[in-house]
Image (cartoon, helix red, strand yellow):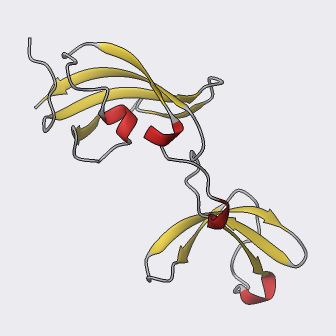
């Protein structure tokens, strides 16, 4: 049987959970995820688990924080005075907004706190600082 090697385009079904079993993403009910192995299109810990797998094989992959979305960085949290925000910006914890960085690039930020005077925004990836578990099934190679 053919085994996955770096550079192959593969399709997988997956379920991603936190270590407590909370599901954060899944391909259930959708087309399989397609990507090139080793091309940096998915997190490193999952990418490295694929070489050697055969079509139809299932595997549980535990991904460390450093092989996933990295650690949380306190400097990626900022407090913005409400008077500096346009009136039409929703002031609601949990929503995601787009913000322009110093380089002009747009980045998603989550609203994590709203007080009478400021809004706290978090530019860390939502899964930063988390250990992750993926149940994967290799659907096809090539």
Count numbered badges in the picture.
0
Query: Looking at the picture, does residue 88 appear above or below residue 27?
Result: below
**Which picture quadrant has residue 130?**
top right
Query: Looking at the picture, does residue 95 appear above or below residue 59?
Result: below
Q: In this view, does 2 lie to the left or right of 138?
A: left
Q: Position of residue 68 (x, y in %)?
A: 46, 40
**Which picture quadrant has residue 48?**
top left
Q: Which residue lies at the image location 16% right of the left edge and 35% below the top edge? A: 6
Q: Which residue lies at the image location 69% right of the left edge and 81% below the top edge? A: 88
Q: Is residue 119 left or right of residue 107?
A: right
Q: Position of residue 98 (x, y in %)?
A: 55, 71
**Which picture quadrant has residue 43?**
top left
**Viewer can see residue 19:** yes
Q: Which residue lies at the image location 71% right of the left edge and 84% below the top edge? A: 85
Q: Position of residue 77 (x, y in %)?
A: 68, 66
Quadrant assignment for the C terminus: top left
Q: Position of residue 31 (x, y in %)?
A: 31, 34
Query: Looking at the picture, does residue 85 appear above or below residue 18?
Result: below
**Viewer can see residue 31:** no
Q: Which residue lies at the image location 13% right of the left edge and 39% below the top edge? A: 7
Quadrant assignment for the N terminus: top left
Q: In this view, does 102 lie to the left or right of 55?
A: right
Instruction: Compare residues 131 and 108 and report the one nearer the observer.
Output: 131
Residue located farthest toward the right when viewing the structure as drawn: 116
Q: In this view, does 59 lie to the left or right of 71?
A: left
Instruction: Compare residues 66 and 52 and report the one nearer the observer.
Output: 66
Query: Looking at the picture, does residue 108 appear above or below residue 125?
Result: below
């Amino acid at each position: 049987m053919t085994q996955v090697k770096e550079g192959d385009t593969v399709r997988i079904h997956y379920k991603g959970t936190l270590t407590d079993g909370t599901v954060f993403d899944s391909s259930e009910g959708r087309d399989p995820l397609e990507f090139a192995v080793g091309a940096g299109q998915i997190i490193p810990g999952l990418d490295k688990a694929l070489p050697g797998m055969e079509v139809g094989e299932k595997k549980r992959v535990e991904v460390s924080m450093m092989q996933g979305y990295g650690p949380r960085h306190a400097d990626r949290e900022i407090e913005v005075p409400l008077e500096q925000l346009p009136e039409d910006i929703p002031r609601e914890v949990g929503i995601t907004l787009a913000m322009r960085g110093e380089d002009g690039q747009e980045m998603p930020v989550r609203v994590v706190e709203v007080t009478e005077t400021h809004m706290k925004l978090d530019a860390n990836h939502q899964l930063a600082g988390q250990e992750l578990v993926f149940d994967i099934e290799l659907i096809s190679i090539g």
